[in-house]
Structures are given as C-alpha cells and as structure tokens.
Image (cartoon, grey):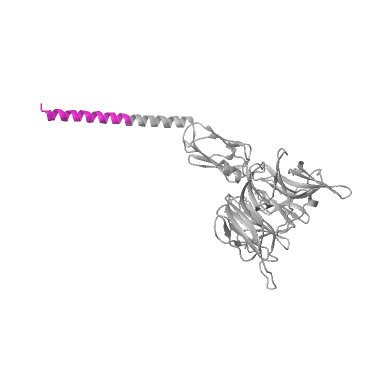
C-alpha cells in the first residue's frame, strides 16, 4: 500500500473525528441553552439590569427606575408595586423591562426600596418578586447674599450651611433662579438690565436677549427642565405707550430669544403668574384682576374669574391656591372646578398666605400672626395645615423679626422660611427688588418640625418665585 493512500485514509479519519467532536459540542451547547431557558422559565423573571439616577430623582420629578429581566413580561399593574418610603409613582411595562416613574422628587439622603410583586413572563412559568434598593444623595441648593466683600454672590451650599461655595459674583444681582442645568441671573449694570445664563458652576456665561432697554422682574423657573419666564417693562413709557409688565418665556438651554405671551382683552399687563407643573401652561393674574390659564403662546387664555393674588401651585399637582375677594380658594386647573381652602382649626394667630406642599392633598405651609389685644405684634408661627385644618407648628419667629417668604423643597420634606431679623434696625436696600440688608433662611423638616439650619442669605433655589 502506498504512502499516499495511507495518508489519505488518516486525513479522512481525522476529518470524521473532527466533525463528530464539533457536532457533540454544538449538541451540548444546544442542550445547555435549552436547559438554561427551561430553568429561566421555571424560576420566573429575574433582574439582569437596573437603571436609576438617585441624584436626578432628588432634583426633579419624572425620574425612573427601570428593571430589565430575563423574560418578556406580562403587563404590570400599579397595585403590584410598592415604594418605601411612600411616594407617588406610575408604572409601565415594555418587553423585558418594567419602569417606575416618580411623579415627585424623592427625599434626599434616604434609602429607597422598590418591590414589584407577581411578575410573570409571557410564557409559562411561575411569578417572581423583583426588588431593588438605592440611596439618594444629600440635597444641596443655591443661595444669594447681597453686599459681600466681593459683591453680590450666589453660593452653592449643603443644608447645614457648612460647605458654601461661591459660584457667581456680580456688583448688582437683582434675582436669580436655578433650572435643571443652569443658573439664570437678573443683574443691572447702571441703567442697563441683563439676564445672564451660566452653568450650575457659574461658568460659560451668556446673555438672554432682552426685548430692549428696560426692567426685568418676577423671574421664575418651571418645576423641572429649562423653562424660565419674567415680566419686562420698557425703560421709557411715553404717551405713545410701550411694553409694561409684559410676560416673556425662554429656555435656558438655547440661545433663542424670549417669546412674549400675548394675552387678549382688557388690561394685559401681568401682575403675577406661575408655571403650571408638568405642562406648557401658565396661570396669569393681570393688573385688572383677571385670572387666566394660558398656553405657551397666550392666544387661547381661559378665564378663571377674578383674583387678588396667586399663592402657588404645588409640584406634582394641578391645583392652584388663589386668593379671591370671598377668601382663599383651591382651583383645579384641569377642569376649572374650585372649593374653599380648608380653614385652619384653632389657629395660633391670624392666618396669612398659603404655600402648597408638593403632591395631592399634602396640605399647606401658612404663617400665623400673633397679635395681642392691644394691637401689638408679638410673634409669627409658621405651621403645616393638613387638609382637615389641623395646624402643626413648625417654627416660632419672634415679634422683632419679619417673615418675608415661605417655600417648600421639591420633595416636600423641608420648609424654607425667609426672615429679616430685628426688622426695626434692618433697613431695605435700594434695589429694584428691595430687601432688608440682613436676611436668614430657616430650614425646617416638615414631618418632625425640627429646624435643620439657619442660612445667611435669600433666594433659596427651591423657591421658584422672588421673595416679597
């Protein structure tokens, strides 16, 4: 037998051996994959990936936890989901993922647990329970001080005031607001008004183009995102007229010029206004006391009667608290229905304006003036008023001091109370938005009534409207 024929037979044997080995491997892989699939179905859906941004969840509503599993899922109902500590949320199911969207910002510096019960795959197999835990970071905020050694300064600070970091300084800052990613700062340089946009660290400053020379006031920010707005008046108002207290909106995220909100009928000068949370709408109060609900263009404003003032609209809510001649009312902006705000039971003094707490049915923060029988002002109590009128005191302010503003943190955990100490010896400055020279912002945890800190300054960035 020739050497060539022996070599050929050897190659054929090796080829058959390779094919048999390859087939065995493929078969084993198929078997393992099949067994793995059977095991996966037998065990029920399991989590393979989690997406959550705790810092974003603290800062604004709309943050999500997305759990991706090993199987395509049956639709999950909101009743199957629990979140601790409790917070409002919605649920959606898509393919192998379930998403939990928080409709309010979460509490800071807290451990959260999300549990999804009775999770089933589209195929056969038992249900399983999915659980995810995460911790939110401590909350920080921006605060302003006028008249520092370096000029008017915006600081970033923690809630204790121990880590104040100056981020922007200017010789004359009227007001500022913080959006999701920017600071929006109203300044004056002599007779000139400017609105400056910076990053949150005060860098990359640029201007929002104003309609002309004039005055900017009532600067506000939306509850999330980049929308801001302000009223503008021309520097000179002659017999020929001009812009006076006209409402403009803009985005801090681009360089587009601000858009005027054109209102119809009557006196269209704007005395007060608010963004409506989670919508493109605004609630506007005109100089002739008309209350209007308008869209982003202003042409389709819906009349809501007359009013004296807008106290606020809680984050995560469509209910506005408005003062009418007949008293303080709650107006549902989705259908125009309204009811009187629940009167406080056994109030510790004469009730003042009501600041709504984020959420639905979360009550309000109100100030109560304690006035003696001789008419002397003795103290102010800041209290939480529940929906049944129960008053729970949070902060006692002595009669020597004046309360200028109350606002509530995005999650509803803290109340911020702006106080001018020793008001008799604390004169106002000469700004367009005049304020006493010495100001303190007291932070109080609403649930416990414990004061967290007293910060030097005003315009805490939770407050979406100017003080006053």
Name the quadrant containing residue 268.
Answer: bottom right
Give the answer, above or below, for where 258 lies relative to 82.
Answer: below
Seen as rendered, the residue at the extreme bottom is 240
Residue in view at x 21 percent, y 28 percent: 13
Seen as rendered, the residue at the extreme right is 374
Q: Position of residue 226 (x, y in %)?
A: 58, 53
- Judge from the rendering whether residue 53 lies leftward or rightward of residue 27; answer left or right: right
- Judge from the rendering whether residue 441 lies leftward or rightward of residue 105; answer left or right: right
Q: Which residues are magenta?
A: 1-25
Residue in view at x 39 percent, y 32 percent: 33
Q: How many marks?
A: 0
Dominant secondary structure, magenta = helix
Q: Which of 340 and 86 lies nearest the eye of the viewer?
A: 86
Seen as rendered, the residue at the extreme left is 1
The question of residue 432 being in magenta is answered with: no
Seen as rendered, the residue at the extreme top is 1
Q: Which of 465 and 86 lies nearest the eye of the viewer?
A: 465
Q: Position of residue 220 (x, y in %)?
A: 65, 55
Image quadrant occupied by the N terminus: top left
The question of residue 6 being in magenta is answered with: yes
Q: Position of residue 12 (x, y in %)?
A: 19, 30
Q: Position of residue 406 (x, y in %)?
A: 72, 48
**Residue 79 visible here:** yes
**Residue 274 visible here:** no
Residue in view at x 22 percent, y 29 percent: 14
- Judge from the rendering whether residue 125 lies leftward or rightward of residue 327; answer left or right: left
Image quadrant occupied by the C terminus: bottom right
């Amino acid at each position: 037998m020739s050497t060539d024929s022996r070599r050929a037979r050897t190659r054929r044997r090796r080829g058959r051996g390779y094919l048999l080995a390859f087939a065995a491997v493929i078969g084993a892989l198929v078997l393992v994959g099949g067994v793995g699939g059977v095991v996966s179905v037998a065990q029920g859906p399991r989590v393979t990936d989690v997406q959550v941004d705790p810092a974003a969840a603290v800062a604004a509503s709309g943050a999500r936890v997305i759990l991706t599993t090993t199987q395509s899922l049956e639709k999950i109902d909101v009743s199957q989901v629990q979140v601790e500590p409790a917070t409002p949320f919605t649920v959606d199911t898509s393919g192998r993922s379930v998403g939990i969207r928080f409709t309010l910002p979460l509490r800071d510096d807290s451990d959260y647990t999300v549990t999804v019960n009775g999770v089933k795959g589209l195929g056969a197999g038992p249900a399983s329970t999915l659980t995810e835990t995460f911790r939110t970071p401590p909350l920080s905020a921006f605060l302003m001080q006028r008249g520092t050694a370096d000029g008017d300064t915006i600081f970033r600070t923690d809630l204790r005031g121990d880590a104040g970091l100056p981020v922007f300084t200017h010789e004359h800052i009227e007001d500022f607001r913080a959006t999701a990613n920017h600071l929006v700062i109203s300044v004056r340089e002599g007779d000139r008004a400017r609105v400056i946009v910076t990053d949150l660290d005060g860098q990359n400053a640029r201007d929002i183009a104003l309609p002309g020379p004039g005055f900017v006031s009532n600067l506000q920010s939306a509850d999330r995102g980049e929308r801001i707005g302000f009223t503008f008046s021309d520097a000179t108002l002659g017999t020929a007229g001009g812009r006076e207290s006209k409402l403009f909106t803009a985005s801090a995220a681009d360089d587009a010029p601000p858009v005027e909100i054109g209102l119809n009928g009557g006196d269209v000068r704007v005395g007060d206004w608010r963004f409506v949370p989670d919508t493109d709408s605004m609630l506007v109060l005109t100089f002739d006391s008309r209350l209007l609900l308008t869209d982003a263009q202003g042409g389709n404003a819906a009349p809501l009667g007359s009013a004296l003032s807008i106290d606020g609209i809680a984050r995560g809510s469509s209910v506005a608290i408005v003062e009418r001649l007949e008293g303080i009312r709650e107006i549902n902006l989705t259908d125009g229905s309204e009811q009187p705000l629940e009167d406080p039971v056994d109030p510790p003094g004469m009730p003042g304006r009501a600041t709504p707490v984020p959420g639905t049915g979360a009550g309000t923060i109100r100030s109560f003036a304690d006035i003696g029988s001789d008419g002397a002002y003795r103290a102010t109590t800041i209290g939480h008023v529940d929906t049944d009128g129960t008053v729970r005191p949070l902060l006692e302010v002595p009669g020597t001091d004046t309360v200028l503003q109350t606002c509530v943190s995005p999650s509803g955990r803290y109340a911020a109370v702006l106080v001018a100490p020793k008001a008799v010896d604390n004169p106002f400055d000469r700004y367009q938005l005049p304020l006493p020279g010495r100001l303190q912002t007291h932070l109080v945890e609403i649930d416990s009534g414990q004061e967290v800190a007293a910060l030097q300054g005003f315009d805490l960035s939770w407050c979406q409207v100017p003080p006053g």
